[in-house]
Amino acid sequence: MVSILFLVWMVFFDKHDVLTQFKLQSSQERLKADKAYYEKKIEEAKADKEDIERNEEKFAREHYYMHKDDEDIFIFVEE
């Protein structure tokens, strides 16, 4: 009887009950996914930074369509 009462108490009434543990687990999984996403974004930003540092003119021409006065720009859109 006491063990059943203890089990009911731990499952439903304790501050570390099953529902709370489930919520904490799902929150932890979401935070891990967010961490992986932001680590990927950081790596992409580092790669962009290295690209800019290597060739500033190429980066400006490709991303901001900058050109010299005597040049024409042709933009090809891939479908």
Image: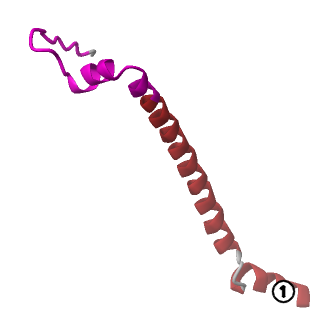
Identify the residue position indicated by label 1 in the image.
Answer: 6
Q: Which residue is drawn at 77% across and 82% down?
A: 10
The kind of secondary structure element at disc 1 is helix
User: Horizontal and vertical percent for residue 72?
Assistant: 12, 9
Q: Is residue 64 above or below residue 74?
A: below
Q: Is residue 67 above or below residue 36?
A: above
Nearest the viewer among 24 and 57 is 57
The answer to whether residue 67 is magenta is yes
Q: Residue at x 51, y 46 (%)?
A: 38
Magenta part of the chain: 50-77
Regarding residue 77, the answer to whether it shows in the image is yes
Which colour scheme appears in the figure? secondary structure
The kind of residue on which mark 1 rests is Phe
Classify residue 73 as left or right of residue 54. left
Q: Quadrant of the N terminus?
A: bottom right
Quick one: label 1, few (<14), some, or many (20+) residues within 10 Å?
few
Classify residue 36 as left or right of residue 17. left
Q: Quadrant for residue 49, please give it.
A: top left
Regarding residue 1, the answer to whether it shows in the image is no
User: Horizontal and vertical percent for residue 73?
Assistant: 15, 12
Classify residue 10 as left or right of residue 54. right
Q: Residue at x 42, y 30 (%)?
A: 48
The answer to whether residue 34 is magenta is no
User: Horizontal and vertical percent for residue 63?
Assistant: 27, 25
